[in-house]
Image (cartoon, rainbow, N blue to C red):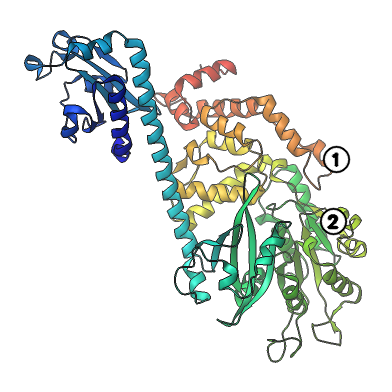
Amino acid sequence: MKLDVIKKEIQKVAEAISLVINIDVTIVNEDMKRIAGTGIYKDKINEIIPGTSAFNKCYEEKKTLVIDNPRNSLLCKHCYKLENCKEEAEVCCPIIFEDKCFGVIGLIAFDSIQKSKITDNKNELLMFIEKMASLISGNLKAEIKSYQYNIEKEKILKVIDSMDRPLVSTDENGVIDSYNSKFKDIFKIEGNPIGKNISLLLDFINFDIFKDLKNKKKHSATFYSEKTNVRGIYNINKIYYKKDLKGFVIDFLDKKDAIRNYNKMNIDYKMTMNDIIGESEIMKKVKDNALKASQSTSTILITGESGTGKELFARAIHFHSDRGDKPFIAINCAAIPEELLESELFGYEEGAFTGAKKGGKLGMFERANKGTIFLDEIGDMSIHLQAKLLRVLQEKEIQKVGGKAGIKIDVRIISATNKNLLDMVEKGMFREDLYYRLNVLPINIPNLSERKEDIPLLVNHMIKVYSKKLAKNVSGVSSHIMSILEMYNWPGNIRELQNVIEFCINMTNEKIISDVEILKNRFSMDDQTDFIDYIENNSYDTQEISKKISKKSGNLKNIDENKKETIIFRTIEDIEKDQISKALEYYRPYKNDKDKVAKVLGISRATLYRKIKKYNIDIE
């Protein structure tokens, strides 16, 4: 980006300088093209200044130049106008942004009075001109940020518009500020909906919903649009900026899509314990316990934070059980509103409610008969449905919505949650009798931060998967990138790691991911500042990061104290020393091996030698 993008602002700066000091001003860009000027230079905009001028010298050296006597100055001896020069004095000040020169401000005196204004108050004048150069740099920075923001905004809008579901965003009062084409198509909205209140366009959303949402995290409900005869689910998510509610994002699913997306009846999707990646001691123990549980008929409760892979374990347990060739039905209890979830779980009889299809419908429990049903996010199930689930466990039968007779079933129940169900029991939010019925065989999946030695295995596997999926020739990450990935605390667990790896593969054009810039802003932990500092400067406070990680670890849920004691943590310095030593050993046979090591680690040669000395690494 060049200064030309802010020519209007630069012309105003030139005029302001000239007005204050009463000297002609001209400003050129990096191509030595005049883009602003006052006095005689105002009519010479777009003129190219010769490469032998003082402007070019100032640009190359990125230093302010003051020429008291142009006709006798060494800086001007090659100027083609030297013999006819009318200038009495000249000041050239570079316009610097992020250590790059984008142009030069020039002050030219044509008489002794103007010259004295330069020479008599030189220090004050230079301070003033350099402040004006900084002002231009600030305007350029703002323009670059705006340009980058608009590009990212356009990308996001394209992604949103390509989604296969209606999406709309509003301000905090429900006034629409963005939407995708699917939203207009599905609900047959004419004209531009921007600036209109969504409650006026969709009859099933009323303004009171937004008032109620201020005390809730999320709102989900079923909808029916009389205008378009569309029935389904909509979710309202709140948007915050610095803890202030700024608006809502609403997505819609028609009923068929909702059932297809949330009730994942992937019977052919096989998963074994060997398919679950992890060779750490804690993962070996979990897989061993899960394998033992697979041979039982008792209920299983899988606990663990979001993104740890609870469903993978449920599928593997099913595969290794004597029901492995029978149906495996997975349903997310948090994703479907209560009124729809009941009919999906237990089915309904013909005529059970308005819109019920002829002949009724089989529920998930009936479809899972002789097999396994996986109830994910069980902690989000309503008390009403908890009672019906308890009956299934006690009597081995279900009752359809609108039905009277019980239907016998033979289903193994595996449930999962990222919530503390015992706390919910104490608060009356979860039935105690149901908790003990579900929690016969408990399995806790460790957070990724507890099994960091598995990260290289996971990263290499994900690179293979996403390289093939995205048709990219990426085979690995540099040791420096791997060090960063191993240091990070991964609050989003494996799901967050997948997100980061997929992003990196999308963004890189190299076979080995080594550009640390790609990782910036991809982390979500509270002590993100330390990681950004590490990535940018390769410097960090080991003790401070350790304190923050320890503090965060103290808040982790469902971790047995005995398990904590068996985990061996490596210090950041140990990891860094190990990675440097490995890189030095690998590149030892090569010419310019230190340069290659510095490049692959993403650090300068000087930083490499400093760290070799710090860790007393033998390089002979």
**How many marks do you count on the picture?**
2
Query: Relative to the observer, which residue lies in front, 589 or 314?
Result: 314
Measured along the vertical axis of the image, is residue 360 above or below residue 292?
A: below
Query: Relative to the observer, which residue lies in front, 510 or 293?
Result: 510
The percent coordinates of residue 458 (x first, y second) are 61, 47
Q: Looking at the image, tell me whether mark 1 or mark 2 is earlier in sequence order.
A: 2
Quadrant assignment, res 449: top right
Residue at position x 46%, y 41% in the image:
512
The percent coordinates of residue 186 (x first, y second) are 52, 75
Q: Which mark is residue 479?
A: none
Secondary structure beneath label 1: helix
Measured along the vertical axis of the image, is residue 267 above or below residue 45?
A: below
Indicate left or right for 427 with 493 as reference: right
Measured along the vertical axis of the image, is residue 516 above or below residue 125?
A: below
Is any atom of residue 473 visible in this view?
Answer: no
Using the numbered discs, state the Cα–Cα distance from disc 1 to disc 2 in whole angstroms: 21 Å
In the image, what residue type sits under mark 1?
Answer: Asn
Identify the residue position indicated by label 2 in the image: 421
Residue at position x 70%, y 52% in the image:
308
The percent coordinates of residue 313 (x first, y second) are 73, 58
Query: Relative to the observer, which residue lies in front, 161 or 610?
Result: 161
Is any atom of residue 356 visible in this view?
Answer: yes
Label 2: how many Cα within 10 Å (few below 14, some 14–19, many 20+)? some
Identify the residue position indicated by label 1 in the image: 562
In the image, what residue type sits under mark 2?
Answer: Leu
Tag nearer the camera, 1 or 2 = 2
Label 1: how many Cα within 10 Å (few below 14, some 14–19, many 20+)? few
Query: Relative to the observer, which residue lies in front, 507 or 159?
Result: 159
Secondary structure beneath label 2: helix
Measured along the vertical axis of the image, is residue 345 above or below residue 87?
A: below
Quadrant assignment, res 424: bottom right
Indicate left or right for 232 with 157 as reference: right
